């Protein structure tokens, strides 16, 4: 009977929230399962990388990644094209989740974004994308492209 009472004390001493881990009645640690859960995959993020091309209609098409797995998930991309003084400033960003486990084909997918701006007065401008730039004269006869590392 004394042995049964000791087992009850040990079990009662380790009761509480979460999942108890005990090695003795006085050494009990409650483990919250949210503290030990494996984190999900990190989002992959890209900002102002790839190639931005501005055409005569003042539409910027930005290829942020030219070949990622077709199995990437939750792809989000956007860009802006602003006219600031004599600069046409393009900014772009994209993010996605890596493929989940399992089989995935080797095909590529492009991650891009498109944006526009109202046409400013004709004249000389600098197209800026990330740390890169190129000269442009409006109206544009052909697209001007800038590659950012």
Image (cartoon, rainbow, N blue to C red):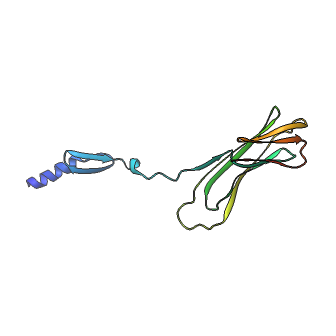
Q: How far across and how far down the image is residue 68, in percent?
A: 65, 59
Q: How far across and how far down the image is residue 75, in percent?
A: 64, 53
Which residue appears at 91% of the width and 37% of the height? 122
Which residue appears at 39% of the width and 50% of the height? 36
Task: Looking at the picture, tell me which residue is in the foreground, 14 or 43.
Answer: 43
Classify the position of the N terminus by image quarter.
bottom left
**Total label count?**
0
Which residue appears at 53% of the width and 66% of the height? 102
Q: How far across and how far down the image is residue 44, in percent?
A: 59, 51
Task: Looking at the picture, tell me which residue is in the foreground, 29 or 3.
Answer: 29
Q: Is 149 positioned to the left or the right of 115 in the image?
A: left
Vertical order, 29 against 83 (above or below): below
Q: Residue furthest left?
A: 1
Vertical order, 26 against 101 (above or below): above
Q: How far across and how far down the image is residue 130, in percent?
A: 71, 42
Q: Is 142 positioned to the left or the right of 49 in the image?
A: right
Q: Is 30 positioned to the left or the right of 61 in the image?
A: left
Q: Residue 133 occupies which quadrant of the picture?
A: top right
């Amino acid at each position: 009977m004394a042995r049964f009472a000791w087992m009850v004390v040990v079990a009662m001493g380790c009761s509480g929230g979460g999942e108890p881990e005990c090695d003795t009645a006085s050494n009990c640690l409650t483990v919250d399962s949210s503290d030990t859960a494996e984190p999900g995959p990190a989002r992959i993020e890209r900002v102002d990388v790839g190639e931005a091309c501005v055409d005569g209609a003042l539409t910027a098409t930005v290829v942020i990644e030219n070949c990622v797995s077709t199995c990437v998930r939750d792809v989000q991309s956007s860009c802006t094209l602003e006219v600031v003084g004599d600069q046409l400033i393009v900014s772009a960003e994209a993010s996605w989740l890596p493929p989940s486990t399992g089989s995935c084909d080797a095909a590529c997918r492009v991650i891009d974004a498109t944006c526009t701006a109202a046409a400013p007065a004709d004249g000389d401008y600098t197209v800026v994308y990330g740390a890169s730039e190129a000269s442009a004269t409006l109206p544009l006869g052909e697209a001007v492209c800038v590659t950012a590392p």
